[in-house]
Image (cartoon, rainbow, N blue to C red):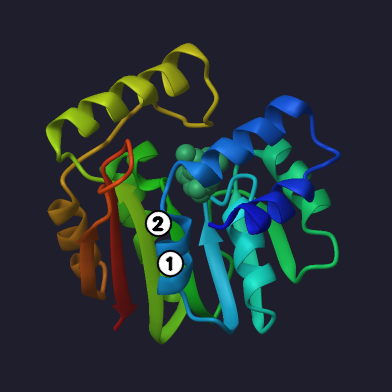
Amino acid sequence: MKPRELGTVVGRFAAAPLGTRFHIWGRLRSFPVDEVLEALPHEGQLLSLGCGHAATEIAALLRHPELRCTGVDPDGAKLGHARRAAEGLPLTLIEGTTPPPGPFDAALIVDVLYLLTRAEEAALLTALHSALRPGARLVLKEMDTKPRTKYLWNRMQEFLSLRVFRLTRHRHGVCGLRPAADLALQLEAAGFRVLRSVSLHGGWLHPHHLLSAVRL
Ligand SMILES: C[S@@+](CC[C@H](N)C(=O)[O-])C[C@H]1O[C@@H](n2cnc3c(N)ncnc32)[C@H](O)[C@@H]1O
């Protein structure tokens, strides 16, 4: 993401505390946002699960005026900041963990599934499948378990975030990081066809992995 665009998105969070703004700035600098946004359709109704502060979604809406977005997250405090930041943009925010009834044209999930148990993940993907129209695109960004050094670095960071500082909301303290190939199988089992599975770790500290799938 170019510095000017980053500044515009973070600037929308001007009412949030400095720590929150710094977190959002760091978040947008820590993963390949451009690749994620480019994998999404540029128009239609997008559903984002686990949107958090919705900074990525706000960036998508600023880039693509024909896009509409609904974001879902259980963290009401993050959604409060997102709501203020998204003023004037077509972003609807829902506190919870369940996809609202669709049909949506596309879905986005960025670094959420590792927080869920396998049973929760299967239930979420089934509900997501129902909320998407046939042919809808699903863009999923999670962490892979390779390269090993980046995986270990990520594991340590998640341990601090989930168990020590409790920065991320989760119910079980699970840290279900697993190989991206497993996740692709899970998507196929839930009624999606994986079109693209690509490692994006090059140039980044973390083992980012992007999966792009279509809802059958
Ligand atoms: C690591 S953050 C990622 C947030 C955002 N997607 C991003 O990229 O900045 C994980 C998010 O998942 C949310 N979350 C936790 N459990 C969830 C669930 N069962 N369903 C949906 N979101 C969940 C958390 O509240 C948190 O905002």
Q: Please name the amino acid that badge 1 sits on.
A: Leu
Q: Is residue 134 above or below residue 27?
A: below
Q: Is residue 91 above or below residue 118?
A: below
Q: Quadrant of residue 80?
A: top right
Counting from the top left corner in percent of width and height, residue 88 is at 85, 67
* 130 left or right of 142 in image: right
Report crowding for label 1: few under 14, some 14 to 19, many 20 or more residues within 10 A (C-alpha): many
* 212 left or right of 54 in image: left
Residue drawn at x 46%, y 62% is 34
Instruction: State how far apart marks 1 and 2 are (Cα).
Output: 6 Å
Front-most of 202 and 114?
Answer: 202
User: Which residue is situated farthest in the front direction here?
Assistant: 3
Give the residue at mark 1: 128
* 94 left or right of 181 in image: right
Q: Quadrant of residue 196?
A: bottom left
Q: Is residue 77 above or below residue 118?
A: above
Marks 1,2: beta carbons within 8 A: yes
Counting from the top left corner in percent of width and height, residue 2 is at 57, 57
Q: Is mark 2 within 8 Å of ligand 1?
A: yes
